[in-house]
Amino acid sequence: QVQLVESGGGLVQAGGSLRLSCAASGRTVSSYTMAWFRRAPGKERAFVAGINWRGGTYYADSVKGRFTISRVNAKNTVYLEMNSLKPEDTAVYYCSADDRGYISSKAEGDFASWGQGTQVTVSS
């Protein structure tokens, strides 16, 4: 099983930017679909962005045009660039990995491996 460690969270003002990183170890994830989810206070964990092994990307409507997911296979790392942040983006952000080869996984149950999460707080 792959281990995932997120970093890069923090406190930022509305309109600001952050870049989250997800470092994978234990296995090479170049053939995996990777995704970011988030859990806002009082809400269930929700899909944010995904990138498949082909390099194709897909996003939740709430972040489309503001967030960008990318991967560097040589570093076994996935990133989430977050711009124009809003207070409603405040959440714990989780990295996840799907080793089945599907290209558009979005449900929590599609992902077998999860990181511990990193807190993102956006102040108004």
Image (cartoon, rainbow, N blue to C red):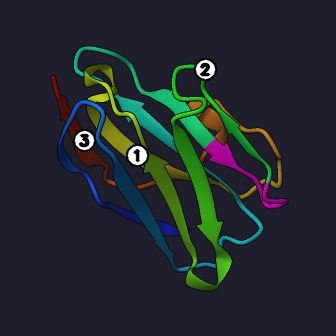
Q: Is residue 56 left or right of residue 38?
A: right
Q: Comparing marks 1 and 3, which lies closer to the viewer?
A: 3
Question: How far is disc 1 from disc 3 in space, using C-alphas?
Answer: 11 Å
Question: In the rendering, at what x and y percent does residue 15 appear?
Answer: 30, 33
Which element type, helix, strand or loop, lies under badge 3? strand
User: Which amino acid type is shown beneath numbered disc 2?
Assistant: Asp
Which element type, helix, strand or loop, lies under badge 2? loop
Q: Is residue 48 left or right of residue 15?
A: right
Residue 108: in magenta span = no
Q: Is residue 4 left or right of residue 63?
A: left
Please name the predominant secondary structure of the magenta segment in the image: loop
Within 10 Å of disc 3 (Cα), the crowding (few <14, some 14-19, many 20+) is: many
Asked whether the residues under the numbered discs 1 and 3 touch, taking CB atoms below 8 Å apart as contact, a structural biologist would say no
Residue at position x 38%, y 19% in the image:
44
Identify the mark at residue 120; answer none if there is no mark: 3
Q: Comparing marks 2 and 1, which lies closer to the viewer?
A: 2
Q: Is residue 26 above or below residue 36?
A: below
Residue carrying label 1: 94
Pick whichever, 62 or 117, lies toward us: 62
Question: How far is disc 2 from disc 3 in space, using C-alphas?
Answer: 19 Å
Asked whether the residues under the numbered discs 2 and 3 touch, taking CB atoms below 8 Å apart as contact, a structural biologist would say no
Residue extent of the magenta highlight: 50-55
Identify the mark at residue 61; answer none if there is no mark: 2
User: Which amino acid type is shown beneath numbered disc 3?
Assistant: Val
Question: In the rendering, at what x and y percent does residue 101 appear?
Answer: 83, 55
* Picture quarter with the C terminus: top left
Question: How far is disc 2 from disc 1 in space, using C-alphas?
Answer: 18 Å
Question: In the rendering, at what x and y percent does residue 76 appear?
Answer: 58, 77
Residue 52: in magenta span = yes
